[in-house]
Amino acid sequence: MKIRSLWLIAVSVTIVLGCDAAGNRPAFAQTAPQPSSPPVATTSLPPPAGAATTTTTTTATTVAPPAPAASGSALPDGGGVQARSPGMELPPEAGLPSGPTGAAGAVAQKSAEEVKAEIRDDAFNAALTGLMPLNPPEIRKLLKRFDETKEATEIPIFPYPEPVTVVKNVSLDPGAKPIELKLATGNVTTVGLVDATGAPWPIADLTWAGNFTVTPPDPGSNSFIITPMTDFAAGNVSIRMIGLPTAVTFVLRTHRDEVYYRVDARLPENGPFAKPSLIEQGMTIEAGCDCLTNILDGTIPEDAKKLEVSGTDGRTTAYKYVGRTYIRTPLTLLSPAWSESSKSADGMNVYATGNAPVILLSDKGRMVRARLSDEKDKKDDVR
């Protein structure tokens, strides 16, 4: 019984190893020649009882793993898990440059001038990028943004003050309130002093207080310039006039609604350069009332009625107000006689006269005859 069991085991081993009863392997199991294996021991089993005597040799062989297939891929083997995708295999010529020196051989093929030129180009591009990293459109955009930011920081949040030119009558009375000069930051104000006849009155000296910059007058001049240095500056200025014992004072203060560009300050006295009157009126020359000053300044009263002036140029205008006629002209009035007059530093005159339809003016010695009429008189002439 033991002999029969051993014989069955030998047959089973032969079948598992892929051999037929004669010890030959099937055709589908044949592979490439394998390396020789070391010899193993053989066992001779006796045949079972009643069977012919047969000697079976069992050979134990060690099957080596199959050799990897030859491939032209330069990439590492995938371990037999999956095949390589097309395009992943490198051509045989890929890799370092051929030649005995490899990559150094490619550099050796360039001349010294070419290598030097490449180095200079690289250095120039690096310097250009370091010094000027922005391109022209980016620079323009940056400058535009900078300009917008500068405009937003420099433009004041309040409107610019309205510039005006005024004529002020200065009072020398002890209890009179000094005239206030409206100033504004970033603007200069020129103050000129004239006498009752409109002639310049020279300034001897002046002193001021407050956060202002004052440009003193030149010797013999009648004007000076004031500039405030802050938005909320306040102070005053005291002026001594040649030949006038009383000092002239002004209040200095900054404003945001309006600013005096030019101030003609008219003193109620005759100065050193006073102009003699062509017609003796038998009265003292005075600085004039507020009505004269307003008309001289160009601020016409609302109730005043403008008259039509013919026979002269447009520089002469006339107004009827409170039963009197006010003539504003750079010319000298000869007739009719005037009761009050006022003159600015630029040569403009205002005369207060009675109601007269015709006036005589002197234009640098030449007599000019002008006619004054209102709309009612013009309608009557048409009829």
Image (cartoon, helix red, strand yellow):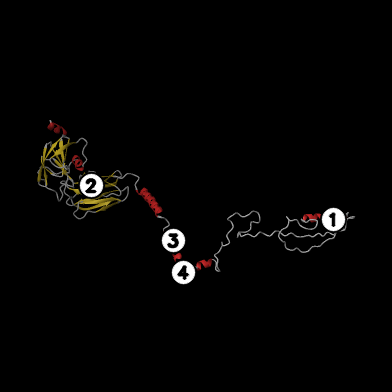
Label 2 or label 3, whichever lies nearer to me, is: 3
Q: Nearer the viewer, mark 3 or mark 4?
A: 4
Q: Which element carries disc 3, helix, strand or loop? A: helix
Q: Secondary structure at mark 2?
A: strand
Residue at position x 53%, y 66% from top?
Answer: 103
Q: Earlier in the sequence, mark 3 or mark 4?
A: 4
- Mark 1 residue crowding within 10 angstroms, few (<14) / some (14–19) / many (20+): some
Query: How far is disc 1 from disc 3 in space, using C-alphas?
Result: 89 Å
User: From mark 2 to mark 3, how far is it between C-alphas?
Assistant: 64 Å
- Residue 16 picture quarter: bottom right
Q: Quadrant of the C terminus?
A: top left
Tell me the residue that label 4 is attached to. 112
Task: Name the amino acid type tagged 2.
Answer: Val
Which residue is under mark 2? Answer: 263
* Marks 2 and 1 in Cβ contact (< 8 Å): no
Position in image of residue 112 (x %, y %):
46, 69
- The residue singled out by tag 3 in the image is 125
Q: Amino acid at mark 1?
A: Trp
Q: Earlier in the sequence, mark 1 or mark 3?
A: 1
Q: Residue 59, relative to residue 340: is it above or below? A: below
Q: Could you say where residue 227 lies in the image, as x and y percent from the top left?
A: 28, 50
**What is the spatial separation of the Cα atoms under label 4 and label 2, in whole angstroms?**
81 Å
Give the secondary structure at mark 4: helix
Does dot 1 land on a helix, a strand or a loop?
Answer: helix
Instruction: Give the label, 1 or 4, closer to the camera.
Output: 1
Q: Which residue is mark 1?
A: 7
Which residue sits at x=21%, y=46%? 265
Badge 2 or badge 3: first in the primary sequence: 3
Q: Position of residue 343 (x, y in %)?
A: 17, 45
Amino acid type, residue under disc 4 in the picture = Ala
Determine the CA span between mark 3 and mark 4.
Answer: 20 Å
- For the residue carrying disc 4, how many other residues have a C-alpha within 10 Å: few (<14), some (14-19), or many (20+)? few
